Image (cartoon, rainbow, N blue to C red):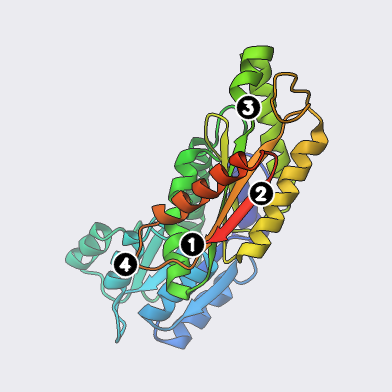
Amino acid sequence: MSDSSFLFSVDSALGASYSERPKLLIVDDQPVNIQALYQVFSASCDVFMATSGQQALDVCRQKSPDLILLDVVMPDMDGIEVCRKLKSEPETRDVPVIFVTSQDSPEEETLGLEVGAVDFITKPVNPAVVKARVKTHLMLKIQADALRELASVDGLTGIANRRRFDERIEAEWRACRRTEQPLSVIMIDVDHFKKYNDHYGHLEGDTCLRMVAQALKENQWRGRDIAARYGGEEFVCLMPETKLEDAIKKAESIRARVYELAVPHAASDSADRVTISLGVSCTVPDERDLTSVMSAADEQLYKAKEGGRNRVEGANS
């Protein structure tokens, strides 16, 4: 199979062009085995390498591979234990793992599948066989990711929904706790939205929410940031590894963009147009529950409303 046909087959799994090369992690304590697999995939995939179980876990957290080729027999932490750990973490549990090993007993294969592997390849590997199996599981992974993405989108506004946000903040809370990095949350509320609905009707209310969501999407977000509809007229933004002052700047940018839309709001008590109030909280995750940062952002949002609305309030928590 040529490299171009390999990538074309992955594209076809979605029925559209796959804009990024697949990311493949090869884990083996023998560099010669890594090199052999690297030669097979380097032209068609972005290949990362690890020579120990712990290194493999670290690379997974940093690089988010699309698929892992994992040796079973390794000195510090064997592949079975690595796979168990990967499947126990929300950030890595959906990454397909293919075991590559010299052991080919039915018991070994059964154990590998029981801990979450999707396939089992024996050494020495046949390049054509391993390439075909990787292609198959990459296509299945891309399709599964697309379905999960559809289930994570708010039907009205087209941005992430509450379920997606809850999943992400849980994962980012753990990640920032490990690295001792700050995590910021922006809570957003459309000012006097009930009065807007009562005055203009629910169809116009829906249009208003879509315009606010579009203002959120128009802001420049980094790869791990997420903006979501939290419920009703509330929105929320998650910004990992972001200090309070930077999160406040982002919140002010969002506030200004919504104000610039100049959507009329004749029933508002505070402005002639649709405005939003924003509360920002920043914390370095610790032993506290992640709801602490959400509660703190909500407190700041309440402060913004009490202060006259169409404003940003923020604090470290």
Q: Give the SS element for disc 1.
A: loop
Real-space Cα distance between discs 1 and 3?
A: 28 Å
Q: Is residue 140 above or below residue 46?
A: above
Can I make out residue 80 in this image?
A: yes
Front residue of this view, candidates 83 and 8? 83
Name the kind of residue labelled 4 in the image: Lys
Which residue bears the numbered disc 2?
A: 312
Name the kind of residue labelled 3 in the image: His
Which residue bears the numbered disc 3?
A: 192
Q: Earlier in the sequence, mark 2 or mark 4?
A: 4
Nearer the viewer's eye, disc 1 or disc 4?
1
Front residue of this view, candidates 249 and 15? 249
51 with respect to 226 (left or right): left
Which residue bears the numbered disc 4?
A: 85
Specify the quadrant that holds the N terminus. Answer: bottom right
Nearer the viewer's eye, disc 2 or disc 4?
2
Which residue bears the numbered disc 1?
A: 317
Q: Earlier in the sequence, mark 3 or mark 4?
A: 4
Residue with the most extreme left position: 107
Name the kind of residue labelled 2 in the image: Val
Real-space Cα distance between discs 2 and 3?
A: 16 Å
Real-space Cα distance between discs 2 and 4?
A: 41 Å
Nearer the viewer's eye, disc 3 or disc 4?
3
